[in-house]
Amino acid sequence: MAKIEKDIVVAVPVKIVYDQWTQFESFPEFMEGVKEVVQLDEKRLRWSAEIAGKDEEWEAEITDQVPDRHVAWRSVTGATNAGSVTFQSAEDGKTIVSLELTYEPRDAVEKVGDALGFLERRVSGDLERFKQFVESRGAPTGAWRGEIHGDQVEKGSGTKTS
């Protein structure tokens, strides 16, 4: 398994950053190669992306989610991957976003790309574009304030939008 860890400081408060991150269907607006993310229910997402020149689809499930703190997920179909993102308040109303991603390169092209750091650079670019996206808006496109702990989903206040 390969692992990527990246941090970025976003110049808006943690609630806004977290609320925007939970709008998974907006990911194609700032994630390179991601064509579509469809939220199937509170826990499950269907992804469509171009990876190493190939169209890929997979489903992921959110395994843990706590408002303004973190979101963790793992793939349930397709390429093996998992990750988490944490949100920490910083001075002057800023937020530190920390992303950890683990994945299993499946073929020679993905293994070579991994060795050359392509995915790591893509993740860095995605985080930078997320920062620009949320900072330029000043407000999230929606919010979901529920919690997920394993199979338990606790719906919170807020609106779930696309």
Image (cartoon, helix red, strand yellow):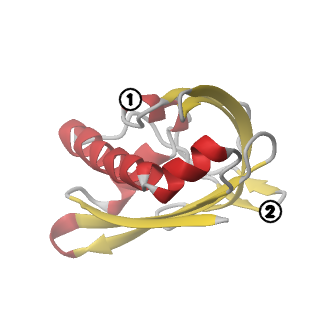
Front residue of 57 and 129: 57
Q: Which amino acid is tagged 1? A: Glu
Amino acid at pointer 2: Gly
Residue 128 screen position, x and y as percent: 28, 49
What residue would you read off at disc 1? 29
Instruction: Give the image quarter of residue 94.
Output: bottom left
Where in the figure is residue 46, as x and y percent of width and height?
69, 32
Query: For the point 80% across and 62% down, which residue is it?
Result: 150
Q: Is residue 92 above or below residue 109?
A: below
Q: Name the residue rendered at 28%, 60% in the picture.
A: 13
Which residue occupies 19% across, 75% down? 91
> How packed is label 1: few (under 14 Cα within 10 Å), some, or many (20 or more)?
some
Residue 74 lies, in percent from the top left, at 71, 54
Quarter of the image containing the N terminus? bottom right
Q: What element carries label 2?
A: loop
In this picture, is 74 found above or below 55?
A: below
For disc 2, the neighbor class at 10 Å (few under 14, some 14 to 19, many from 20) is few
Q: Is residue 85 left or right of residue 80?
A: left
Residue at the extreme left of the image, as rendered? 92
Give the labeled residue for mark 2. 150
